[in-house]
Amino acid sequence: METKFANRVALVTGSGRGIGAAVAQRLGAEGATVAVADLSAENAEQTAQSIRDAGGKAQSYRVDVSSAADVAQLVSAVEADHGLITLAVTAAGIIKTFNFVDLPADAWDRTMNVNLKGTFLVFQAVARRMV
C-alpha cells in the first residue's frame, strides 16, 4: 500500500458509488483515512468496506449535502472519530433529465441544492476548521 496520504483524513462526499467511490478507494489505497459520505448509508458502507478489505482505513457516514445541519454534523462526527479533515472532495451530485420547457422548478432546486450548495456547504465547513 502506498503512503502518499498517510496521516491524512479525507472526506469524500458522494462516495457511495461512481466517481466518488473511485476517489475514496484511491485515497484509501494511498494511505488516507477515508470518511465515505453519501446520501445512501448502504452505498457508503459498501465503499468503506471495499477500502477496508484492501487494507485501508475507512468509515461510512450518511449525509444530505444540501442540508447545512447534516454537513455540520458530518464534519463534527468525522473529526471526533479521526481528527482534523485535511482533504475534502465533493463528488455528490444528481441529474434530473427533462426537456427544458418541462423542467419542474423543484427538480431544478434539488439539483442546485445538491450539486452547488452542497459543495459550498462542505468546503465552507471544512475550511472553517482548517483555518
Image (cartoon, rainbow, N blue to C red):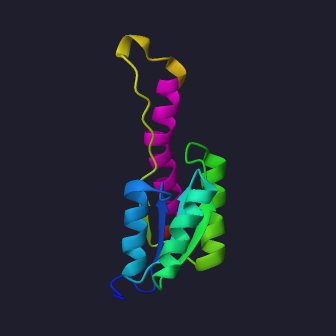
> Is 52 within the magenta?
no
> Would residue 90 be found to the left or right of residue 83 on screen?
left
Is 80 located above or below residue 3 in the figure? above
Residue at image x 40%, y 55%? 18
Which percent across, then down, holds residue 50?
49, 73
Can residue 50 be spotted in the picture? Answer: yes
Which percent across, then down, holds residue 52?
52, 80
Can residue 131 be spotted in the picture? Answer: no
Which percent across, then down, holds residue 4?
33, 84
Residue at image x 45%, y 73%? 86
Q: What's the magenta region? A: 107-128
Front residue (pair 114, 73): 114
Which percent across, then down, holds residue 119?
45, 48
Quadrant where the N terminus sits is: bottom left
Residue at image x 64%, y 76%? 81
| Residue 89 sits in quarter | bottom left
Is 88 located above or below residue 119 in the figure? below
* Dominant SS type (magenta): helix
